[in-house]
């Protein structure tokens, strides 16, 4: 099923099945993938969409246990850090999935690194992935790990192909191939740099 919206709202794309069956733990795991640079016009749509998902809009929580959630993220700049901050503010435990590379060296500027370290200290769990031969390969492995452990994937995505191996488009494609439901958050008509 494809949702459509006026240009001032988010485009939310959901598959026919909103979530895979929750694991026996009774926890619905929501993973994220998304662009590091989010246009100013898109950010309010992204934040509102993420808050709605954490409050249960568009998710079925499996066994009716009251909707316990867990957030899975690599804590990269942009979508990942916004997602983690919103999850933590809503009391949702966050699992940091750290790619098998010198991750901090590739995160970006000092502000992004400070935010990464701040959020990492607040995470309930850390999954440090094994080393990969390339940084891009490590990002792809982290994206796949998130999809493989998620019941639902949130993608802050402009709908265009990935700009490099392991980019948002690659992770969304993998989720779709493996049957993980994807919610896409983006403002129609906005193009990123």
Image (cartoon, grey):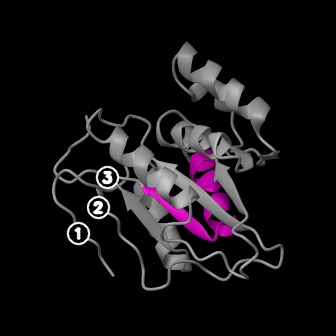
Badge number at residue 110: none
The local crowd at label 2, few if under 14, some if 14 to 19, many if 20 or more residues have their Cα within 10 Å, is many
Residue lying farthest to the top in this orientation: 110
Q: Which residue is mark 1?
A: 4
Q: Which residue is mark 2?
A: 11
Q: Is residue 49 magenta?
A: no
Residue 11's image quarter?
bottom left
Q: Which residues are magenta?
A: 137-155
Q: Secondary structure at mark 3?
A: loop
Q: Which residue is mark 3?
A: 186
- Is residue 3 placed above or below 170 in the rendered structure? below
Question: Which residue lies at the image location 20% right of the left edge and 45% below the top edge?
Answer: 190
Residue 60's image quarter?
bottom right
Q: CA distance from mark 2 to mark 3?
A: 6 Å
Is 37 left or right of 86, judged from the image as shown?
Answer: left
Q: Find out whether the residues at labels 1 and 2 contact each other: C-beta distance under 8 Å.
A: yes
Is 162 left or right of 105, judged from the image as shown?
Answer: left
Residue 57 visible in rendering: yes
Q: Position of residue 167 (x, y in %)?
A: 45, 50
Q: Position of residue 193 (x, y in %)?
A: 25, 34
Q: Earlier in the sequence, mark 1 or mark 3?
A: 1
Q: CA distance from mark 1 to mark 3?
A: 11 Å
Q: Position of residue 19 (x, y in %)?
A: 57, 77
Q: Find out whether the residues at labels 2 and 3 contact each other: C-beta distance under 8 Å.
A: yes
Q: CA distance from mark 1 to mark 2?
A: 6 Å
């Amino acid at each position: 099923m494809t949702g459509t919206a006026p240009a001032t709202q988010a485009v939310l794309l959901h598959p026919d099945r909103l979530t895979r069956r929750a694991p026996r733990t009774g926890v619905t795991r929501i993973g994220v993938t998304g662009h590091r640079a989010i246009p100013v016009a898109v950010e309010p749509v992204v934040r509102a969409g993420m808050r709605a998902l954490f409050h249960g809009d568009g998710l079925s929580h499996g066994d009716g246990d009251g909707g316990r959630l867990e957030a899975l993220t690599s804590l990269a700049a942009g979508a990942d850090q916004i997602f983690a901050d919103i999850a933590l503010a809503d009391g949702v435990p966050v699992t940091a999935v750290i790619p098998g590379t010198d991750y901090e060296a590739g995160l970006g500027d000092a502000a992004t690194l400070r935010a990464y370290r701040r959020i990492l200290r607040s995470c309930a769990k850390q999954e440090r992935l094994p080393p990969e031969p390339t940084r891009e390969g490590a990002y792809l492995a982290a994206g796949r790990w998130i999809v493989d452990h998620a019941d639902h994937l949130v993608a802050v995505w402009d709908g265009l192909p990935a700009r490099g191996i392991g980019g948002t488009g690659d992770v969304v494609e993998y989720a779709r191939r493996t049957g993980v439901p994807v919610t896409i958050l983006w403002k129609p008509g906005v193009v990123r740099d």
